[in-house]
Image: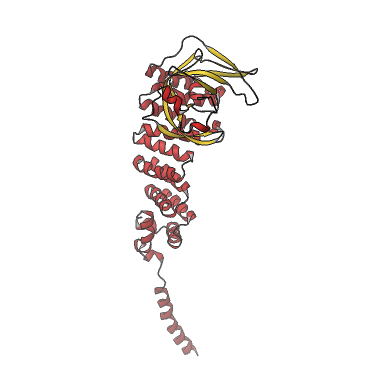
Amino acid sequence: MAGRLAVLFCLCLPFAAAAQERSPSYLDLNPDDVFATVYERLGIALPVKVARDPQVWTTLDELKREACDQKSIGDLATLLEKLGYRREAAESQFNFVRACGAPVIALHRSINILLKLSDHVKAVEVADEFVRRAPTNHDAHYLRGVALEGVGDYRRALIDYANAIELFNTDKRKIGSSVFLRMANAYAKLGRFCEATTPVLNWIAIDPVARDISRTQKIIADYENEGNCAVGKTVQSEKYALRGQQHVVTVTAEINGVRGTFIIDTGASYVSVKSAFAERAKIPQSEASDITLLTANGSTKGSLTRADKVRLGKLEAQNVPVVVQKSDQKNFGGGVDGLLGMSFLSRFELQVAGGFIEIRSRRRK
């Protein structure tokens, strides 16, 4: 009996060894071969030691089985960042969206990584795709603006910052100062120092109690000095009654010496005019760039340019950013040439009290 058991035992050992030989570990496989289609689709090539990381291998295997698994591509990017392969993380996110069409948040992440790598050229490419797929996404425009600054294209960066602010259609007090300061810097890099004050002044005007401080005042003064901007020495003011439930204030103002009828609108970022008035006032449009404006009637397109001079009674400002509206027929109403928005009004102090709005010269602090 003992002899039979011994024979059986001896017969079993070779079979056990053969079973082990037939079950190789994944570490014995070449990831370049196993994941060739995944690498090609994501536009990356990972070192063998990285691909053999257990979590990376599992994620790549998921993407091999489900090419457009959004969770898996997010997990892969996180793993690659942790392992120090940030460029591969950025490239995989970008190419995944191009292949699968979503999610655009992957483009956001890709741009952030590329900006940290100081690869502004590639960041612009990815940001262009982000804006193409999500044209009303304020983050898409902001990130492209940062990337464009990095390659020295301040004119396009300026437009993207303007769009980022306009497309932030919730409480603008929640917008950080960076987009306004970057927009001001873009104006300054273009040698347009007087216009550079406008984004800073607009940011202050959103919450003057908290933001009209010595630091912001110095930024404005530095731009004014650099551009030799005309600043009135005497205090002037104009006062208008608020009419009706909507408190609509219609005034007569001059732009480039041409008189027109305007509505004072503290909710509008820019002085906006109809194209017919722009022609009469000789507001330049040949080098203007389109931005999106959110109005009470919905979104509309306009061309961001500037007026040499805007005058309201005794109040005057020079080099004022102006938007020329594309569709005259539905904007502002009959007999109205445009809006006096914050690109002009923020140059002054505003006070609403007792059924009146008072606009007066800014006082240096």
Classify 195 as above or below 1: above
Looking at the picture, how far across and down is residue 56, in whole percent? 43, 57
Can residue 88 be seen at all in this image of the molecule?
Answer: yes
Residue drawn at 43 percent across, 49 percent down: 82
- Residue 80 placement, left or right of 265: left
Residue drawn at 41 percent across, 54 percent down: 99
Classify 326 as above or below 253: below
Looking at the picture, how far across and down is residue 277, in whole percent? 45, 24
Closest to the observer: 9 or 104?
A: 104
Closest to the observer: 61 or 23?
A: 61
Can residue 175 be seen at all in this image of the molecule?
Answer: no
Closest to the observer: 353 or 306?
A: 306
How many numbered marks does the figure carry? 0
Looking at the picture, how far across and down is residue 199, in whole percent? 46, 26
Name, please, the residue furthest toward the top: 234
Name, please, the residue furthest toward the bottom: 1
